[in-house]
Structure formats: structure tokens, C-alpha cells
Amino acid sequence: MDLHPLDKRYNVFSENPKGADENITVRGSKLYWAIFAIMMFSTICFIVWAYTKPRLERPFHYITASITMVASVAYFTMASNLGGTPIGIEFIRSGVVAGLTRQIFYVRYIDWVITTPLLLMELGLTAGLPWNNILWILLLDEVMIITGLVGALVRSSYKWGYFAFGCAALLLIGWEIILPSSGNARFIGADVHKHYIMLGMYLIVLWYVFSSPHLTSPPSFLPSGPFLEMWKGKKARRKEAMSAKSSYVDPSYPTHRFLYPIAWGLCEGGNVISSDSEAIFYGILDVLAKPVYGVILLIVHEKIQLDRLGLGDTIVNPSQPLLRSGPGEEYHAEVGRMGEGVERVHGMNFRTASSMRSAAAKENGMDGHSSA
């Protein structure tokens, strides 16, 4: 494959040659290097931030640093033109997006399959969700990411079946974030609910709605009829660009909002935008969803005591005896400190404060009987 003169002078492509017709260029590689630097710098900052806190107050710092650390490795790999494979294109195009194969970065999905569950786990812990709910949300996320990867690696129209599975999982995740989790956060307190809504809506906006380059011609997989007319939109978009048969990205056009699944359709699925444009889209999204979101989340948790979320007493020194001045007193202490409703006592979930009181009363009765 002949290289562009810029590519020949760029050491990355000399060491790791292009393997696909539609491949990142020097621009895409340099963008990935820039995002790698942002991720690595953020990781260092989050780790330093963690060590300014007591050991038991670092769970969110550790999780956030882990997210950007994994992303750093992924972006280092993509900037080096590694971690990808050429896949045959279902929709053959001409113009800027030309050729028979497209570079698919499977390392991006390896990143997402690790980091997006951590993002959702942070959100679930902020809402004080029990672990069965959190694990359900994480499973949905894994389904969404893995089906996206499988669909990206499939050349035939069967990829859209995996696309549908991923969309279904994404909708279920949105449902869990908006309704059950929000209700749990409201139960803990108005301030926790307010912070949760801010964090949850931030993720929803990033995952479901995002600014993407506007297309000068509709993708070929869009069915004819009223949907195609809606795509064309204003008369200005029906001029010369609409008469051209090639599909390309015109940076002079204003941005348009697409749902995140449609963005996948424009990149890996429909082969509508170039690999460099794909790098811009996913790169900006990851910076907003990982370092920026991490900073916001850690600032929010400066205002929330971990005990209220059931995370304050998860580590116990086995060499120290449990301090209790009377039978069952530790139960009452937990109830008074954490408030009403679902509580966490020594890492165990109790449904209500009354159940803990009854357990303590039962223990008192047993101790009194044995002493007699």
C-alpha cells in the first residue's frame, strides 16, 4: 500500500504500516497521542488526589484513576496504529471514505468493556444501590459493548442484529439510571439525589446524544421514504452536495445531534465518515466521559459522606475487637448514624431500620436469658 508523503515521514506508520484501505492518517494518530496525554495526566492527578484522603475515603478516587489508566493504554495503542484489524466493508463508497476494508480498533472495545462498567458502578454506588442492581446494570453494559464489537467485526448485514441487541441493552441501562436508581438516591437524601441527577444526566447526554459532523449525503443504509426526507432536512442540504454520489464529511457544515447508536452506524457500521473523523468523535466523547466526568464526580463526593452510601465501614481491622458497650448497641449506632430505610451494617444490607432493632432486641433477650 502506497503511503502519503506525510505518512512516510511519520515514524508510527514506518514501524506499524497501515493494514486497511480506510485507515487513520497522521492527523488521526496525532489526535490519539494528544488524548493519551490527557488520559495519563488525569490518571496521575487522580492518584495524587486519592493519597490526600484517608485510606477509607478513596474508593471513588481509585475507580476514577483506574478508568483513565485503562484508557491511557488504549489510546497509546491506537496512536501507534496498533490494536486494530482490517474488516471488509458492507457499504462500498467512493471519495474520502473509499476502499474495500476499514480499520476497526478492537482495543477501543477492550477499553470500553473495562471502563464503562466502572463508570456505571460509580454512578450506582452514588445512588446507594444494592449490589444485585449494580451487577444487573454492569451485565447490560457488557452486552452493549460486546455486541458492538461483534457487529463491528462482521462484514455482512448480520451486524445490524448485534446492533439491535446493543441498542436494547443501552435503553435498559437508561431506564435503570433514570428511574430505579434515581428513586434510591432520593431515599438517601435530597442532596444525594440532586448530585446523582447531575451525574446521571451528564452520562446520558454523552451516551445517548452527542454532536457529530453533519453529512452532505444520506447513508445508503437509510431506507427511502419519509425518513430519508427527514434526513435531507432544509433546502440548503438538497443542492449540489445531495446530487453527489459520494458520502463524505464537510467540516464547513454545522454539527447535528445524533443518538449514540447512529454514531456507531456512521463509523463501524455504515462506513460513512472517515477513520480520522471517527477519532475526533470518539476521542472527544471519551475525554468528556472519563477525565472530565471523573473530576465532577470526585468534587461531588467531597460533599457526601461515604457512610450514607453504605461504604464507610467496609474495611475492618481483624486485629481490633468490635467495640460495643452493650449487647446490640452497634446496631442502634448504625441506625442513628445512617438514618431511615435501607441500611448497611458491617457490610450487610438490612431492609429497614426496624429489622435491625428487632434483631438487637432479640439478641438482648437471649443474652439476658443466658446470664440468668
Image (cartoon, helix red, strand yellow):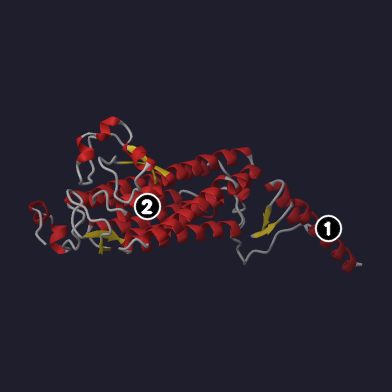
Q: What is the crowding at mark 2: few (fewer than 14 residues within 10 Å), some, or many (at least 20)? A: many
Instruction: Identify residue type, mark 2.
Output: Thr
| Residue located at (38% from left, 58% from top) | 160
- Where residue 81 sits in the image (x, y, percent)? 22, 59
User: Where residue 13 sits in the image (x, y, percent)?
Assistant: 15, 59
Seen in the image, is 351 located left or right of residue 226?
A: right
Q: Give the image quarter of residue 91.
A: bottom left
| Residues at marks 2 and 1, CA–CA distance in whole angstroms | 48 Å
Quadrant location of the C terminus in the rendered image: bottom right
* Residue 295 is at least partly visible in this image: yes
Q: Quadrant of residue 130?
A: bottom right
Q: Residue at x 34, y 46 (%)?
A: 224
Mark on residue 43? 2
71 sits to left or right of 332 = left
- Name above or below for residue 205 compared with residue 75: above
Q: Residue furthest bottom?
A: 370
Q: Residue furthest toward the top?
A: 235
Q: Residue furthest right?
A: 372
Secondary structure under badge 2?
Answer: helix
Classify mark 1: residues with Cα within 10 Å, few (<14), some (14-19) or many (20+).
Answer: some
Residue type, label 1: Ala
Residue identifier under label 1: 361
